Image: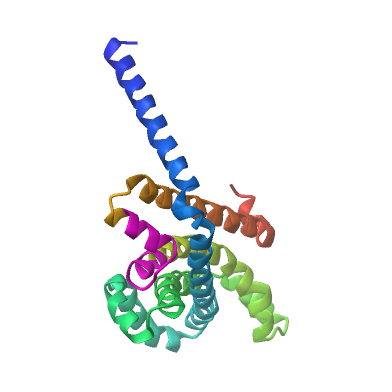
Amino acid sequence: MKPWRRLALGTLSVVTFVVTWEVVLALVRWDGGRLWRDIGVSAEAFVVGLGLAVVVGIPIGLVMGWRRRAAFALDPLLTALYASPLIALAPLIIITAGVGLGARALLVFLLAVFPFVFNTFAGVRCTDPLLVNVVRSFGGTDRDLYVKVILPSVVPYVVAAARLAIGRGLIGILVGEFYAASEGLGFAISRFGDTYRLPEMFAGIVVLAVVAVGLTSGVRRIEASVAPWRAGRR
């Protein structure tokens, strides 16, 4: 190995160690042990917003996929909303919903709901018509179609939507707590950045990254349990 490469690798190793050590220390001394409280505050709004996105987004996607008139009426409107910069509406949402859990959960919902709508819609449209015709030929009802054909077909699309929604929801938490919170991970990251406490700021970012990886891994495990035929292809 050439001397300059050896020097560069040694310098990079030292810098990586120092930065990692500073981030670990920042996590330990996070505002006198408030780390878990901040995580809990952020998690509450995230769970509420993401739960609403699931409850609202999946049924809308099912209706749009199964009813052409619903798709014709809703698809242009939802596409326009999805393409619009919803983050820019954060101040308006806060003025309307107030400072607190409601505004933050609403931001998470607005960012996370569209992947569920459009992926569920695509999943219904991609359902094998042959399976639908078989169920109908044996006298199956609409309920039979939904339970035995459409929902199993939609599951992989919903899982993919969940992965997208997790990332978008975490962005919503950050923005919501930048504007409308006095505690939480987003508020702490913003405060640390404003006061140039960079190790603490990067520690907060690392925590969010770990949470995102953990949630995504959880979604994959759920997929393996509810749709093993899909997970087995990998």
Would residue 118 be visible to someone looking at this image? yes
Q: Position of residue 67 (x, y in %)?
A: 49, 85
Q: Locate residue 41 relative to residue 79 in the image: left or right.
A: right
Give the quadrant of residue 178.
bottom left
Q: Residue at x 40, y 51 (%)?
A: 205
Task: Indicate yes or no whether the magenta region holds residue 19.
Answer: no
Q: Which residues are magenta?
A: 172-192
Give the quadrant of residue 2.
top left
Would residue 208 be visible to someone looking at this image? no
Q: Along the line of sight, which residue is nearer the eye, 176 or 195?
A: 195
Q: Position of residue 1 (x, y in %)?
A: 35, 11
Q: Along the line of sight, which residue is nearer the eye, 166 or 46?
A: 46
Q: Residue at x 73, y 81 (%)?
A: 138
Question: As displayed, is residue 224 above or below residue 41?
Answer: above
What is the basis of the colouring in this image?
rainbow
Q: Residue at x 42, y 83 (%)?
A: 71
